[in-house]
Image: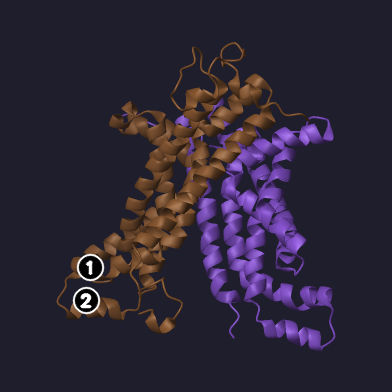
Amino acid sequence: MLSLDLSFYNWALFSDYIQKGLLFSVQLTVIATIGGVVFGTFLALMRLSGNPVLSYCASFYVNTMRSIPLVMVILWFFLLIPLLIGKPIGANLSAIITFIAFEAAYFAEIMRAGIQSVPRGQTYAAQALGMNYGQNMRLIILPQAFRNMIPVLMTQTIILFQDTSLVYAIGAYDLLKGFEIAGKNYGRPMETYILAAVTYFIICFSLSKLVRKIQTKVAIIR
Amino acid sequence: MNMDFGVFCKSTLDGEPVQHCISSIFGIAQNADPSYLDWLMQAWLWTIAVAGLSLVIALVIGAVMGTLRTLPNSGLGSRLLVRGATAWVELFRNIPILVQVFVWYHVIPSFVVPLKELPSYLLVSIALGFFTSARIAEQVRAGIQSLPSGQMAAATALGMNRVQSYRYVILPMALRIVIPPLTSESMNVVKNSSVAFAVSVPELTLFAMQAQEETSRGIEIYLAVTLLYALSAFAVNRLMTWIERRTRIPGFVGTSTDPSLAH
């Protein structure tokens, strides 16, 4: 049985290595959630529109993204973006673009379910009031769809935060990378991996407790 | 961008074309030096092995933990079991899979000495299996809780004890109900097996990264790997649909759209 040396768990460890990674992971999660929800909503609207071309394109995009491992999507974007724009791109920027594009596919399915959860009578009522499609969506359907889906959207965001650790594949400096580099520099990889697991657990566990609380609050009683 | 799939027929050692490209994957001929296609097929087998092993671990533990979480609150023993299973689910659900893989690979073997002997693909399978078991446990629990409480009452009225009620009444119904969500979890296992690259298991993702670097034919390599992942996930989907059809009881749960036949 070997012993663990926890003496280096201090503020310097956090400020020198962890802080930078934590900031990037949070930044990536927030940007990808906002970007993913916006693009995902458009994808959902395309998919639900009567236009067969738009609907086919959206479902092709969503199904393709959902059938490829995230690690491969990260590698694909890291390979393709420099080829398309003709100059190299940093791992962090590449990760942000990848996550927006990837999460849009998952948020699209959530938003689709959200839009479909709004009773049809709402659409008819809005039409009866003389609203066009854009007004109907913006003022009537989407606000209710968002509200119904808040718990699911937040759960997806927690999964997204966990998935940010996969940017390891292209060497971006995220929370996990911060722990790994600290472990190498202090020569104590075991302790930092344990600390990484504990840190992720505390963040994700408290967020999921929060979601459960919110879930009971936002439910619309019909 | 012009593509050149000839890269798969080149030797991994000197980059020269090999003698038997296609025939070697069917075992008809053997190349003197392995080609990239040989390597790709080898990597695919590793992916299948890791995903298959993880799936078995995940299904067994997930079914047990999910069942334990639904035990009725009667006595200290069952309360402890419920608590333990809940802790299991929360622990393995709230840590990213990649971090869990690192902990299994770098940390746990130092404490549990027999694990030191295990090759990395087994450690990854345990990590991925435990991670997925938490998700499967939640599905199984939801499936059991979706059954009408009359089922348990009826089993009790027939004089069955707790174990018999679960074995003969509750689980046969609940496990059939949860096959569709388990299908998507099984496909996730195939996709998540890609994290094995991080501890140098020579599976598809690691192949993609290394072959891309060696050949600079990234697009062709990634295309092949992506297709194999999609194909594997699709095969799992078909397999689960087949199981769903095979285990279906006519007129019972999940089969009929007529609600009067459902229960």
Residue type at numbered disc 1: Tyr
Which image quadrant is residue A54 in? Answer: bottom right
On-image quarter of the C terminus of chain B? bottom left
User: Of residues A162 and B146, which is closer to you in this image?
Assistant: B146
Q: Which chain does brown denote in the image?
A: B
Mark 1 or mark 2: whose residue is earlier in sequence: 2
Which image quadrant is residue B128 in? Answer: top left
Residue type at numbered disc 2: Ala
Q: Residue at x 40, y 47 (%)?
A: B55
What mark, if any, has residue A124 been given in the picture? Answer: none
In the image, residue B38 lies at what x, y percent?
A: 51, 24
Q: Badges 1 and 2: C-beta atoms under 8 Å apart? A: yes
User: Of residues A217 and B196, which is closer to you in this image?
Assistant: B196
Q: What residue is pinned by disc 1?
A: B168
Chain where mark 2 sits:
B
Q: Residue at x 60, y 75 (%)?
A: A218
On-image quarter of the N terminus of chain B? top right
Q: What residue is pinned by disc 2?
A: B155
A86 horizontally vs A73: left or right = right
Q: Secondary structure at mark 1?
A: helix
Q: Which chain does purple denote in the image?
A: A
From where the camera sits, is residue B95 visible?
no
Marks 1 and 2 on same chain: yes
Q: Secondary structure at mark 2?
A: helix
